[in-house]
Amino acid sequence: MIIDCVKVYVKAGNGGNGCVSFHREKYVSHGGPDGGDGGNGGNIVLKIETGDNTLLKYKYRHKFVAGNGGDGRADKFHGKTADDIVLPVPPGTVVKDAASGRIIVDMTDREPFILCKGGRGGWGNRHFSTPTRQIPRFAKSGLKGEEREVIFELKMLADVALIGLPNVGKSSILAAISSAAPKIADYDFTTLSPNLGVVRTGEGKGFVAADIPGLIEGASDGKGLGHTFLRHIDRCRLMLHVVDVSADCDRSPVGDIKLINAELAEYSQELASKPQLLVGNKYDSALPGYNEHIDELKAYAEDNGLPLIFVSAVTRFHTEELIDMTAAALKTLPPLTVYEADYSDPEPEGPLDKTIEITKNGSVYECESEWLYRLVGSVNFSDRDSLAYFQRMLRVNGIIEQLEAAGVRDGDTVRMYDFEFDFIK
Ligand SMILES: Nc1nc2c(ncn2[C@@H]2O[C@H](COP(=O)(O)OP(=O)(O)OP(=O)(O)O)[C@@H](O)[C@H]2O)c(=O)[nH]1
Ligand SMILES: [Mg+2]
C-alpha cells in the first residue's frame, strides 16, 4: 500500500550556551573577558527528492530531532554549530501544521525549505563588557530550537489524471501513452495505488499522466478503495474520463460518467469542475452503429460540449490522437495548482510582544510569554550582573507595572518559568 500521508514530529537543535571566561596569560594580570559564543542548533530542512513518489520512509520513523549547538569555550572559541537534518520528500508533498491543518509549504519545485530553525547560540561574556562593566561574569544561554508536529501529504504532480470505474482500462491507456508500466488485469481494483507516467509529445516537453484506482458508487463513503486517492489528482489540469464502450459491457457509459462525477463532487467541488475529456475505451470490441450506448455517449458529449474520443488501449487505435488532443487541451489550460502557504510564523528574531500572561496559582503569581521565556533563558541567575540585567529588562519593558496591575504586592512570590523570587518594588 502506498504511504501518502504521514504525521511527523520535528525539532530543531537548541543553541549552545555562551561561555564566561577571562583571558589568562603569564605576566598579564587582568586579562579581559574571552568567553566564546555558543554554536547554533541544527535546522530541520526539507528537500525535494526527484524520482521518489512515496512517503514510505516516514512510515516507521516519524520523529526527527536535530543536534544542539556546542557551548562556547574560553579563548574566544565558538561552540560547534550542529548539523542540519535534511528530510527528503517526493515532489508534490504538501506540508501542513498538524494542529491547525494550515499549509506551511508546498514542495513542488523549490529550493530546500527550513521547516524548523535551530536556536541561535548564546553570546559569550566578551560581548558584555562595557566601560563600566569590565568584568562581565555572565554569558547568554542558547535559544531553544523550534519544534512542531506536521503532516506530509503527497499530491502528485500530474498534469492529467485518468479517472473512471474499475476495469475500464485506465491503466492500459496509461501504459499505451506513457513510459509507465502499471499492472493490468481483467478484474476490478487491479490498481491499488496511483501510477505516474511521462507522455512524450511531438513538440514541447510532454506531460505527466497519472492513473488512480477505480472509483465506484459510494466511494465518498469509503466503498471500494474510497476516494482517498483523489488527493493525488487534486492539482491536475485535465481529467481523462475513461468509459468502457465494448459490446460485452452492459453498463451505460453515460450513467457511469454521471456516477463518477457525483463522487468527484462529493469529494471536492473544485476537482469536479476541472475540465474533462471523455475517452470511450475498448473500441476494438465495440459494435459501432449497433450499440445504443455509443450513440448515447456521443449525444451526451455534444450536449455538454465535452471533447470525446474513441480509443483502444489494446490495439493502440487512436492512442496517438488521444495524446495530441490532450496536449492541445493542456496548452489552453492553467498550470498545475501550487498551494500557497497559509501559515506564517511570527518572525523568531523579530520584535516580540512584551505583554505577559499572569495567573495566580495559590499564593504564587505565574508569568508567561514568549518574550519572557527567552529572557529567562538568556539570564544567568547566579551572576549579579546578569541578574541586574534581568531586573532592568523587566523594568524598562513594563513588566513591573503589569505585575502591579495584576495585584502583585511587595513580598508576594512571582514565578517566571524556572525562576522564582519575592516581589520587591
Ligand atoms: N478489448 C479491450 N480490452 C481492454 C482494452 N483496454 C483494457 N482492456 C482490458 O480491460 C481489463 C482492465 O484493464 P485495466 O487497464 O487493468 O483497467 P483499469 O481501469 O486500470 O482497472 P482498475 O485498476 O481495476 O481500476 C484488462 O483485462 C485489459 O486487458 C481495450 O482497449 N480493448
Ligand atoms: Mg488500473
Image (spheres, grey):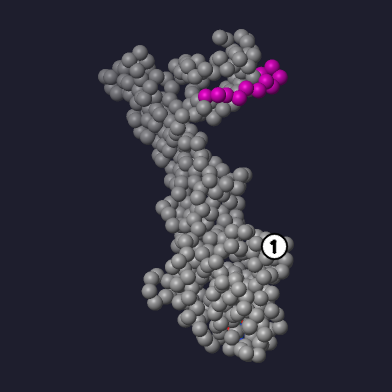
Please name the residue shown 63% across and 73% down the image.
164
Q: Position of residue 70 (x, y in %)?
A: 44, 37
Q: Which residues are magenta?
A: 354-364
Q: Position of residue 321 (x, y in %)?
A: 48, 80
Q: Quadrant of the N terminus?
A: bottom right
Q: Nearer the viewer, residue 394 or 37?
A: 394
Please name the residue shown 71% across and 19% down the image.
362
Q: Position of residue 194 (x, y in %)?
A: 58, 68
Q: Nearer the viewer, residue 121 or 26?
A: 121
Residue receiving disc 1: 220
Task: Specify few, some or many for label 1: CA neighbours under 10 Å numbering under 14, 14-19, or 20 or more.
Answer: some
Q: Is residue 362 magenta?
A: yes
Please name the residue shown 37% across and 17% down the image.
135
Q: Position of residue 153 (x, y in %)?
A: 57, 56
Q: Quadrant of the C terminus?
A: top right
Q: Nearer the viewer, residue 120 or 275?
A: 275
Q: Nearer the viewer, residue 10 or 326?
A: 326
Q: Quadrant of residue 76?
A: top left
